[in-house]
Each structure stands twice: as C-alpha cells, then as structure tokens.
Amino acid sequence: MSAHEDAEVLFEQRSALGLITLNRPRALNALTRGMCVAMDAQLVRWRDDDAIRAVVIRGAGERAFCAGGDIRMLYEAGRAGGSGATDFYRAEYRLNARIRHFPKPYISLLHGIVMGGGVGVSVHGSHRVADASAVFAMPETGIGLFPDVGGSYFLPRLPGEIGMYLALTGSRLQTADMLFAQVATHSVAARNWEMLIDRLAAGEPPDAALAGLPNEPGASSLPEDLEAIDRCFAHGSVEAILASLDEDESTWAPLAAITIRMKSPTSVKITFRQLREGKSLAFDDCMRMEFRMVNRVMGGNDFYEGVRATIIDKDNEPVWRPETLPEVSDSDVEAYFASLGERELELR
C-alpha cells in the first residue's frame, strides 16, 4: 500500500497482482497531473516486474470510478496562462498510451460515473468489468472540448456509428449498453469484486478469474436503435447528420438533433473530423493528434465558457464563439490539427 492512505492514488501489490485505487472520492476520483505521472511510473515498474502478472484499477467511494480530469483545476490553470493545463494533458495522454501498450492484463473495475479521463484510464486496457451502477459518457462537446483520452481511436471502432453518436451527443450508456457497445467487456456485481481480486492475486488469468462471477446487466436499448444510428450518423458532415436526424422518424432522433445543436459548434465540428480521421490512425498517432487539438482548445474561448456555464456559474447558458455551425469554417477546423513543431507529444 502507498505510505500515505490519504494520497490521491494508492498502489498495492497483492502477490501476483498490482492494485491501483483512485483515491479522491469527494472529487469523484477526478484525475490530477500528479496522479497521471504516478500511475505512469508505477505501470513501468509493474511492467518490468516478473512477479506481477496483472494490474487492476478501481475507484474509491460509492459514486464514481472516475468522473474525468479535474476540470475546475484545468479551467483555473488555463486562465492563469502558462503550461499548467497542457502539462496535465501531456501526462494524461502518456498514461493512456502506457495502458494501451501495457503487455500484461489490465483490468478496470467500473462503478458509478465513468466519464472523460475515467474512460481513458479504463477503456484501453484488456478487461473492463462494470457493475450495475456504471454510467459511461464522453460529454466533452458540452464544455467546449472534444472526446479525448484516445476517443479518436476507440470511438470509431465501436459497432457501426455508435462512437460518432456518443461523441456528438454526449449520451450516457448504462451497463447493458456499455456491454453492447463494447465499452465494457464483462459485468460482475461489485459484491464479487474482492473475490475477483483474490483470484487475480493468486495468479489466475483474468478470463478464468472472471468465469462464474456473472451479473445480470439487463437489456440494452442500443440494438433496436443501431440501424437508425448508423443511418443518421454515417454522413460526411455534421450538417448532413443533423439534416438526417431532422428527417428521421426514430423517437430519439429529434432529441439527438436538439442536443447536438446545444453543444459548442467548434467542438462538434472538430470532434467529427477527429473521429473520421482517427478511424484510420494508429493509437499513438491519435494521441498526438489529440494533443495538437487540446493545445488549441486551451488557447481558445469555448472551453472556458463551457466550464463557466456548467461548473463555475452553473447557469447552463454558454455563449459559444462562433455561435453557430455555419460560422465555423473549414480553415477554423484545420487550425486545430496543425503541427505543434517542437511541442508535439512525445510518447515513451
């Protein structure tokens, strides 16, 4: 166990298992730069330790596995100028890549809120085990950001156009939907997690350890909507997607259109391009692309306005700039993807 049980993240070795506990329950286990740096370093140690056969990550408290990055901290750091915000993203993206390339089983135990940065420290691992309380979302377009932490890689690789639907709308998935969408790989009741941890600590392979620990997740609503999602979200532009939603007779389509129109127009457009490009990029190239994008976001308007409206003032009335989709030009979008030169993301 970490020497300080009040540390933001705890590390423990249980025989053949390395156990990570995100330990900011009052902050819904939101990630800080220090947590990302510490986890990255610990994963290197466990990668090179032959005694460690698997790693488990979990979140403290009952409300969340991890609600994302510490958005208020990023807001304040970005407003203050300097490199505080981009330093966080650099550390976070390096950690995402470390997890993606980790050569041993990496098992996430998902409960409560699993959003943003919480997705980044779980979805790239080999096993994602959700209990009945898990709620997944990538809601970044609503705060002037985009679905980062490798969203450009994993979202386009979900079945059909589910990834684009989730990215543009920020819609939430319950456990059964997470399994159908392949965000989660297994469902196990939280009361059985300690048994699972004990089995992994004893050296059992994850699939064997998970066997016999079922949890009935209920029925997913996504299968009945998938045809319409694919029909509406397969188009070549945001405008075409919205036109398709406006014309579609599905019960959810009007709400999806309204939801997208409430998001930052810039975020919606760069997210669309991000996912279309990410579908053909290698993981590390996706992370480099996202780092270029987030640098431009931190230097713009909509992230700060979105956080102000949803978290600081909570008036839920953001004033986006530009205010409408037609005002976001192709050249505006292109600028988010341009090289950073010497400041490009380096992955180790």
Image (spheres, grey):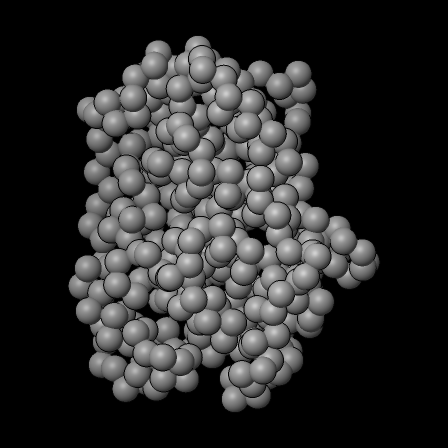
Name which quarter of the figure residue 236 lies in. Answer: bottom left
Task: Pick the residue in front: 251 or 320.
Answer: 320
The residue at the far front in this view is 341
The quadrant where residue 27 appears: top right
On screen, residue 154 versus residue 70, left or right, reads: left
Question: Where does the image place residue 50, in percent across and percent down from the top left?
Answer: 45, 15
Q: Can residue 197 be seen in this snapshot?
A: yes
At a point 80% along the width and 59% down the height, the residue shown is: 81
Q: Is residue 317 above or below residue 205?
A: below
Please identify the quadrant where the N terminus is shown. top right
Quadrant where the C terminus lies? top right
User: Which residue sits at x=56%, y=23%?
Assistant: 45
In this view, the residue in front, 94 or 314, is 94
Relative image position of residue 141 (x, y in whole percent): 52, 67
Residue 209's spot in the image, x, y percent? 27, 22
Q: Is residue 227 left or right of residue 333?
A: left
Residue 144 in view in this figure: no
Residue shown at the point (30%, 74%) measured from the top left: 234
Judge by depth and name the residue closer to the eye, 204 or 110.
Answer: 204
Which quadrant of the structure image shows residue 164?
bottom left
> Is 109 situated above or below 327?
above
Q: Residue at 27%, 70% (x, y): give it.
A: 229
Horizontal side of 19 relative to 307 (left or right) equals left
Q: Is residue 241 above or below residue 280?
A: below
The count of marks equals 0
| Left or right relative to 37: residue 189 | left
Instruction: Single out the residue that lies furthest toward the bottom.
Output: 326
> Measured from the top left, where is residue 10 in percent x and y?
58, 25
